[in-house]
Amino acid sequence: MKLSSNLAIQTENLGKKYKLKNSESWALKHINLNIETGSALGIIGPNGAGKSTLLKILSGLTKPTTGSYKYRGSLTSLLEVGTGFHPDLSGIENIYLSAALNGMSRKIIRKKVDQIIDFSGISLEYINQPIKHYSSGMKVRLGFAVAANIDADILIVDEVLAVGDVSFQEKCMQSMESQMHEQGRTVLFVSHNLYTLQKLCPQAILLYQSEMTQLGNSKDVCESYINQTLDRNDNIKLEKREDRGGSGKIRINKLEWTPTLLQTGKEATLTIGYQAKERLEDMNIKISINGSDGRFLTPLSMHSSNFRPESMPANGELTVKIKNIPWMKGTYFIDIRVIEKGMVCDDLRKASKFQVHGGTFIEGGDEFNSTKNGVFIPHVWNI
């Protein structure tokens, strides 16, 4: 396979098969890609679709079962929190270790070490401490700071930015964009945050059941993914959904709006049902309301509302009352996460979709006829 001069990465019939105890399973198959130099390609799909497997093959962490791939120049990847870090070494020692593993000479590392520390935002108090004492967010910041300062032609990032804080995520996005435009760096980006992915990546691919089902404009691909996911799950009861993360100690089994006809400015109640095997302590439910384009719009959370029951029955329901629905006319979907004593027990993306119909906040006021999802902010005009 000869790599064309305008391409950074090319794959041909790429596939990966794993042998299980009594069977075989294809994690990836029939992947044919031509990724141009200096471009950004988004990779989306449900859990288990093959996204991480594809990136691990391209990063050289696992070998393909079928097919082949080529890339031009040097490549660095950030696939997991603390990739290439040693827990007993300090932050600054891990900078030297990680950069060296990615082919950077010690002389160049010395020139860039202050720049890397500054980008990470980690204080001098912690940079000399073993990273086993770091939070996951600190490890992400350090890992990306190293990756961003390595002079590689290709950068591969797998969802790792979701752990960092919002300001650091924005800094990372700006860094990747500038490297693409100014240095011609090629980026492969996996993320469940479809709005962020669309901002960075003009093109995207959709993986489903180990195969590539769509390649094209990222906005179109993301819309197809959302619609297909919601349509597939419409007739599946929540407790039977398998595309979920967490320990499994708690499972969400009901998300139901009352009334069923939701209108902007009107009152509504969301009933959340759950099941577990024993009584629960220090439980927190976090909900994200997202627009049809994947844009995060509204957070709902037990703890952020200062609702902190010490103990809850193993099976039950909670209700969230919204006095005036703030969302304008359109389609929305819910991501939900359940945490007990700091541990994620259930994590379900696109758990439910719902429609908000026309309405107004102020009696006599005009209805917003926006074609985009959005949140209405109560406001008062004066003269």
Image (cartoon, rainbow, N blue to C red):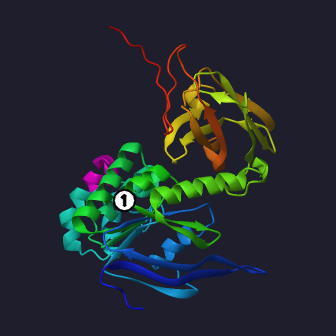
Q: Residue at x 34, y 79 (%)?
A: 7
Q: How would you rate the neighbour count of disc 1 (Cα within 10 Å): few for under 14, some for 14-19, many for 20 or more?
A: many
Q: Residue at x 54, y 27 (%)?
A: 326
Magenta span:
117-127
Give the percent coordinates (x, y) of residue 114: 22, 57
Q: Is residue 61 visible?
A: no
Residue 378 in magenta?
A: no
Q: For the view shown, which residue lies furthest in the top direction?
A: 383
Specify the quadrant of the image occupied by residue 161: bottom left
Q: Mostly what secondary structure, the magenta segment?
A: helix
Q: Quadrant of the N terminus?
A: bottom left
Residue 255 left/right relative to 134? right
Give the percent coordinates (x, y) of residue 71: 38, 81
Q: Mark 1: which amino acid? A: Phe
Q: Residue at x 38, y 13 (%)?
A: 381
Q: Residue at x 47, y 19 (%)?
A: 378
Give the percent coordinates (x, y) of residue 174: 30, 53
Camera-side residue of 181 and 366: 366
Specify the quadrant of the image occupied by residue 35: bottom left
Circle 1 residue: 144
Residue 86 left/right relative to 20? left
Q: Quadrant of the C terminus?
A: top left
